[in-house]
Image (cartoon, grey):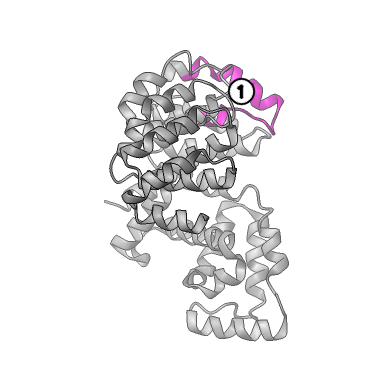
Amino acid sequence: MASIMEMLGSIKEQKAVPLLLPLSHDPEKKIQEAVLACLCKIGSVECVEPIKQALEGTDAEVRSRVLSDLTFSFGFPKPTSPSPLCTALFDVLLKLSRRKEKGADCFDLLFTIDVKKATQLLVNAENLNSSNPQLKTLLLALNRAQVAVPSKMIMDMIPDLKRTAESNPVESGAYGEALIALANAHYPGTEELANDALKLKSHSVRLDAAEALCVAKGLPDPTTVAYTLIEKKGIDSVPPVVRQYAAVREYIDEVNNGGLDQYFFNSSGDSSATALEGLTAMGVDDATQILRKACALFGPSGPSPNRQVRQRQLRDLVNTSKDPFSKLTSDFYKCEELETATLIFVANHAAAFKDSGK
């Protein structure tokens, strides 16, 4: 059933809608969810009513699933064009966002459908206050949409949000997202607040604070900036810090995706020496040692920068050890401060990222 629904949704089969509508209320939840997901993908106005009923219903699990399906089908975070279905559901989603309960997180959708309208309706004192249980998700959506919230509204909440982050590092609340919002609003004191937040115990706040520093420096998306510069100028013509950041970024993404063996097997392994330089410069000792130990497995000369040669080296490694990178990959996943360190590195070298584009 699910595979059929997925196929019908992928081809946006309009003729199937009349047959699907009765099944959107099926007592079997799996059938109901599969049908609603299909209707979200088809996206015609005929699909509005059953999806509206699901969103307004009492089943939080179904509601959350429909919101996820809508977000995916609409192309968040980069929609190609407004969907008739989502546009018709704007008011329903707005009403749902005001319920302030689990399964009602639809801010991203609202800003993606109509950022101007959503900003007018949601950026107010009723929503932007430290007692709002949905404040973090609202600020996250505002930051993703790069909406500049008046800095006074954010600053009025900062003392309460900071106290929450200091008293409960695990459930640190919205403090980090508030710092990013201040950066988006070009608040002049953002860097001082963010640098202070880097001293807090909360890992998530430190990561957000590092992102806020990058945004304040005019680099909200340093990865795109780095890759664009490399593509435009060539890897040897950009500043060393840009090369190092790009190499570390590849290291992180590849290992997260498939482990160290994938990192070295793919072209990302060509720049392992540069990644080591970058990790050392960033001061992340645990991640540096992991990559250094992984490189040492290739012998005194380390992994070849030539992919074909390195793949032969990998085959030889596998022949002598069943899974030579297993423990090192597991250790890598424990490096909590790596992402934060990469963003701080970018913020500290912002001029190099900007000037190299001139």
Disc 1: CA contacts within 10 A as few (<14), some (14-19) or many (>=20) = many
On the question of residue 184 being in view, the answer is: yes
Q: 154 or 43, which is in the foreground?
A: 43
Q: Is residue 116 left or right of residue 122?
A: left
Which residues are drawn in magenta?
A: 154-177
Q: 46 or 291, which is in the foreground?
A: 46
Instruction: Name the residue: 55% across, 55% down.
Output: 281
Q: Is residue 16 left or right of residue 67?
A: left
Q: Is residue 299 left or right of residue 217?
A: right
- Answer whether residue 346 is magenta in the image: no
Q: Quadrant of residue 7?
A: bottom left
Q: 35 or 133, which is in the foreground?
A: 35
Q: Quadrant of residue 257?
A: bottom right
Residue 11, percent across and down? 35, 56
On the question of residue 350 being in view, the answer is: no
- Answer whether residue 162 is magenta in the image: yes
Q: How many marks?
A: 1
Hey, what amino acid is under mark 1? Lys
Instruction: Name the residue: 42% across, 52% down.
Output: 223
Q: Secondary structure at mark 1?
A: helix
Residue 194, percent across and down? 53, 31
Q: 308 or 107, which is in the foreground?
A: 107
Q: Of helix, strand and loop, which mostly describes the magenta segment?
A: helix
Residue 67, percent across and down? 48, 37
Instruction: Name the residue: 53% across, 34% down.
Output: 63
Residue 157, percent across and down? 53, 17
Which residue is labeled 1 in the image?
162
Q: Is residue 310 above or below residue 50?
A: below
